[in-house]
Image (spheres, helix red, strand yellow):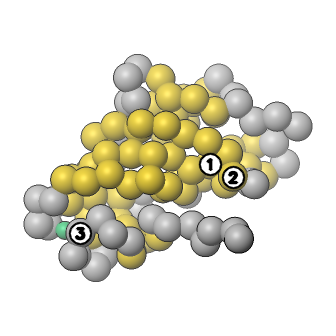
Amino acid sequence: MTIAVRTLDDGAWISVNDSREVGVSDVWTLARGPFCGCEPAAVLLEGFTDVGVDGTSIVAGTVGQCLECGQRSTIDRLAVGRVVDGAFEPYGAAGVQSTLEPSSP
Ligand SMILES: [Zn+2]
């Protein structure tokens, strides 16, 4: 089973299996990570720089700005959703996200 992911429209969308699933301009609540000093941080996403599949997770590189302190930064690995039985399930911007996936050795 192959999951095809890519960015569309200069990084405005993440496409999963040729369906636009995750868009920018949402405010994501980030629980931890090196984005800025706010905890949690309310980050307005400005664009996706890349996207990939890590196991069952869809992880994206993205650029955003914290609405609290104004810090503008990048997130290397934002988990935007997962694949269950071949179908994409978005995590959604409302939930608290951790920006760093546990890295496997
Ligand atoms: Zn902040």
Image quadrant in which the C terminus is located: bottom right
> Label 2 is placed on what type of residue?
Asp
The reply to whether the C-beta atoms of the residues labelled 3 and 1 are less than 8 Å apart is no
> x%, y% of residue 91?
55, 57
Asked if 74 appears above or below 69 in the picture, the reply is above
**Relative horizontal placement of residue 12, taking residue 92 as reference (left or right):** left
The reply to whether the C-beta atoms of the residues labelled 3 and 2 are less than 8 Å apart is no
Callout 3: SS: loop
Identify which residue, 49 or 83, lies in the foreground. Answer: 49
Q: Nearer the viewer, mark 3 or mark 1?
A: 3
Residue that extends furthest to the right in the rendered view of this protein:
1
The reply to whether the C-beta atoms of the residues labelled 2 and 1 are less than 8 Å apart is yes
> Label 1 is placed on what type of residue?
Ile
Q: Nearer the viewer, mark 2 or mark 1?
A: 2
- Residue occupied by mark 1: 58
Q: Residue at x 40, y 20 (%)?
A: 9
- The numbered mark at residue 54 is 2
Identify which residue, 101 or 31, lies in the foreground. Answer: 101
